[in-house]
Amino acid sequence: MNKKVAAVVVLYNPDKNYIKNINTYLYHISLLVIVDNSEIPDYSVYSSLENINHVKFVINKENTGISKAINDGIKLAVKEGAEWVLTMDQDSFFENNMIENYLVAFNEISNNKKVAVIGPVSEKKEAKRLLLRK
């Protein structure tokens, strides 16, 4: 578990399947902040996380937008002592052990005050167009 890294995950009308995504990083972080942007929260979807002591919930009871939800989660994470915040949504997950690569990067640059964001290298793929004819 990395004591400097918290994760903020934004939910919107989730089903219980989002838990498998969270489990790909849950035990590698010191705090998980779940921000639920659902107008009518389904509290039963939290049941498997309620007894984990490093999980906090922010229940908005409205869709405040993803940016505000992320900011709300970050504010709570920083208040709880996080130095780095991993932002996720309910559909985001890590394949295999990729979270370890992120945590190595966090630890390698943790003293560098000029670093604000760490992200994956994305592949540039050629976009293909589908032409529809009448």
Image (spheres, rainbow, N blue to C red):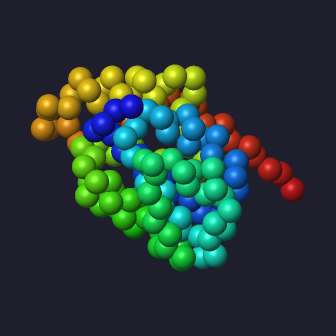
Q: As rendered, which of 28 and 126 lies closer to the eye?
A: 28
Please, is residue 69 above or below residue 63 in the view? above
State the residue at coordinates (64%, 76%): 40
Tell me if 19 is positioned left or right of 103 in this view.
right
Please, is residue 2 above or below residue 68 in the view? above
Please, is residue 65 above or below residue 26 in the view? below
Q: Looking at the rendering, which quadrant does residue 92 occupy?
A: top right
State the residue at coordinates (74%, 43%): 130
Residue 20 in the image: state x and y as whole percent. Answer: 64, 40
Q: Looking at the rendering, which quadrant does residue 127 occupy?
A: top right
Counting the numbered discs, the total is: 0
Question: Which residue is the extreme one toward the right?
Answer: 134
State the residue at coordinates (29%, 42%): 84
In the picture, the quarter occupied by the C terminus is: bottom right
Residue 66 in the image: state x and y as whole percent. Answer: 47, 63
Q: Is residue 64 visible?
A: yes
Tell me if 24 is positioned left or right of 14 in this view.
left
Tell me if 129 is positioned left or right of 111 in this view.
right
Q: As rendered, which of 64 and 73 lies closer to the eye?
A: 73
Q: Is residue 117 visible?
A: no
In the picture, the quarter occupied by the N terminus is: top left
State the residue at coordinates (45%, 66%): 58
Residue 33 in the image: state x and y as whole percent. Answer: 43, 54
Q: As rendered, which of 50 and 86 lies closer to the eye?
A: 50
Residue 43 in the image: state x and y as whole percent. Answer: 63, 66
